[in-house]
Image (spheres, rainbow, N blue to C red):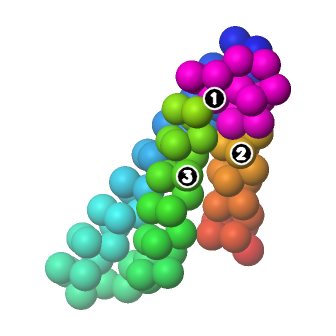
Amino acid sequence: MRPVRGLSGIVAAGTVVLMLVVAGTAVIAGRRGFPGPGGESVTWHVAAAVIAVAAQMYSDRHRGSAAFSGSAVVFVVAGLLLWTQWWS
């Protein structure tokens, strides 16, 4: 379980970094009058980052199938975020 939790921790951290980049881009674009990511995209990224971090914390505090379930939530949320906001 340790490698799976480690990998899901990296994915959760990457989700937080994506959220910071998108939110920062939205702020900078708004201040300079350029088109940037809209409020919907920022909301998706913030929600995904919160869910991923919460699921990772759950995974880190439990063992066995509960830990695996938390890690799976991180992977699913990150995959959904990438699919809906970056690849479509």
Q: Which of the 4 image quarters holds residue 30? A: bottom left
Question: Could you tell me if the residues under marks 1 and 3 are in contact, i.e. CB atoms within 8 Å?
Answer: no
- Residue at 81%, 26% (x, y): give it: 65
> In the image, what residue type sits under mark 3?
Ile
Q: Earlier in the sequence, mark 2 or mark 1?
A: 1
Question: Could you tell me if the residues under marks 2 and 3 are in contact, i.e. CB atoms within 8 Å?
Answer: yes
> In the image, what residue type sits under mark 1?
Ser
- Residue at 71%, 45% (x, y): give it: 73
Work out whether 61 lies above or below 8: above
Q: Can residue 7 be seen here?
A: no
- Which image quarter holds the N terminus? top right
Q: Can residue 53 be seen here?
A: yes
Q: Earlier in the sequence, mark 1 or mark 3?
A: 3
Q: SS at mark 3? A: helix
Q: Earlier in the sequence, mark 2 or mark 3?
A: 3
| C-alpha span from label 2 to label 3 | 8 Å
- Which image quarter holds the C terminus? bottom right
| C-alpha span from label 1 to label 3 | 12 Å
Dot 1: within a 10 Å radius of its alpha carbon, few (fewer than 14), some, or many (20 or more) residues? many
- Does 56 sit left or right of 26 as displayed? right
> In the image, what residue type sits under mark 2?
Val
To which residue does mark 2 refer?
A: 73
Is residue 67 rendered magenta in the image?
yes
To which residue does mark 3 refer?
A: 51
To which residue does mark 1 refer?
A: 59
- Residue at 45%, 46% (x, y): give it: 16
Q: Nearer the viewer, residue 74 or 42?
A: 74
Dot 3: within a 10 Å radius of its alpha carbon, few (fewer than 14), some, or many (20 or more) residues? some
Question: Could you tell me if the residues under marks 2 and 1 are in contact, i.e. CB atoms within 8 Å?
Answer: yes
Q: SS at mark 1? A: helix
| C-alpha span from label 2 to label 1 | 9 Å
In the image, the segment drawn in magenta is: 59-71
